[in-house]
Amino acid sequence: MTESTHTTCESLLGSLSDYIDGELGEELCREIEKHISECENCRIVVDTTRRTVDLVRASNRPDSGLPDDVRDRLFKRLNLDDYLKLPSTK
Amino acid sequence: MIDTTIHDISVDALKAGDRAEFARLVDAYSGPIYRLGLRMLGREQDAEDVLQNTFLQALTHIENFEGRSSLSTWLYRIAANEALMLLRRKRPEVSIDDSDSDDDRDGLSPAEFVDWGALPEEELLSSEGKKALDQAVQNLPETLRMVFILRDIQELSIRDTADALGLSETNVKTRLLRARLNLREQLSAYYGERMNQEKKND
C-alpha cells in the first residue's frame, strides 16, 4: 500500500470480492492485474484473501452428514419416527 | 417461476402434508442447517435447538410458502432467524441489522502483509491450522459471520444470501468483504507467527 498508488489500492479493496469471485468485467480485471503486478502489498492482500476463502470452503467439505444421535432426536421431535430408519435421500 | 422441486422434493406434496416427503426434506437440509447453527452459536446444543426449531417452523408454515424464493433459501431464512433469536437471547446487545456501520470504511484497510498464500494446503489445513480457521470464523462479529457462513461456507449466491437475511445485495457485499478481510487479517497473524517459528527452527 504505497502512498503514490493510494487511490488505486483503495479502489482495489472495493472490487476485491467481485474479483476473487470471478464476477468482475474483463477491463477491471486487467486494471487490477496491472496494479498488483506493481504493488506487492496489494498482491499479497489479493492472494491471501483468495486463499482464505478457498481454505474455509475446503475445510468445510465434504459437507458431512448429521450426527446420528442429533438426527434421531430431530426426527422424534418432528414426530417422524416412522421414517427414522429409512436411508437418507441426499 | 415457483421452485417446486429441489433435491426432487415436491412442494405440493409437502403442502399436502406428506410426511415421507417432509422426512426427505429434513434429510436433505438438516446437515447444512445444523452446521450453520454450530458456526453461528459455537455450541452443539445450541446448534441442535436451531435445527429442531427450524424444521418445526417449516412444518408449521409450509402451507404459506409462496415460492418467491427457493425452498432452500426459505429454510435458510428460518434457520438464520432462529440462530439470531437464540444469539439475542444469550447476548441481548447483538443486532444483525446494524446497517449504520456498513458505509464507513473503518477496519477495511489491511494491516498484515505476510505472504502466506503459497504455503501448501496440508500445512494450512493441518489439525492445528483448521482449529485456527474455525476460531477465526467464530471471532467474526455476528453481523458479518452470518453473511460469511451463508455465502462462503454454504455457498449461497449473493442474491439468495440477501433474500435469506432480508438485506440488500449491496449490504451483503459490504459485509462479505469486511468478513473476508477480517478473516484474512486473523489468518495472516496466525500463519505469520507459524512461518516465523519455522524460520527459527531451521
Image (cartoon, rainbow, N blue to C red):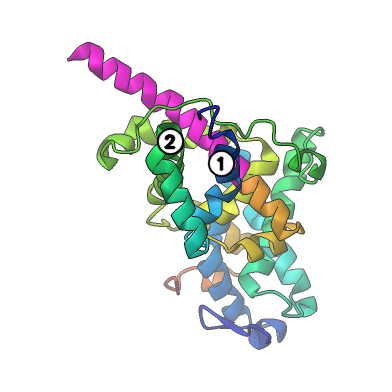
Q: Amino acid at mark 1?
A: Thr
Q: What number of labels is visible?
A: 2
User: Can I make out residue B39 in this image?
Assistant: no
Instruction: Specify which label sits upstream in the sequence, 1 or 2.
Output: 1
Q: Residues within 10 Å of mark 1 (few under 14, many from 20)?
A: some
Q: Residues within 10 Å of mark 2 (few under 14, many from 20)?
A: some
Query: Residue A47, which numbered label?
Result: none
Q: Amino acid at mark 2?
A: Cys
Where residue A88 sits: x, y (%)?
A: 44, 70
At x 77%, y 46%, the residue is B85
Tell me the magenta residue range. B177-202
Where residue B192 sits: x, y (%)?
A: 38, 23
Question: Dot 2 lies on which element?
Answer: loop
**Label 1 sits on residue:** A8
On the same chain, marks 1 and 2? The answer is: yes
The quarter in which the N terminus of chain B is drawn is bottom right
At x 64%, y 50%, the residue is B147
Q: Nearer the viewer, residue B144 or A3?
A: A3
Question: Dot 1 lies on which element?
Answer: helix
At x 62%, y 35%, the residue is B108
Q: Residue furthest front?
A: A4
Chain letter of the residue carrying label 1: A
User: Residue B27 magenta-drawn?
Assistant: no
**Label 2 sits on residue:** A39
Against B61, residue B45 (above or below) is above
Chain letter of the residue carrying label 2: A
Against A75, residue B98 (above or below) is above
Where residue A72 sits: x, y (%)?
A: 52, 58
- Residue B98 placement: quadrant: top right
At x 46%, y 37%, the residue is A42
- C-beta proximity under 8 Å, tags 1 and 2: yes
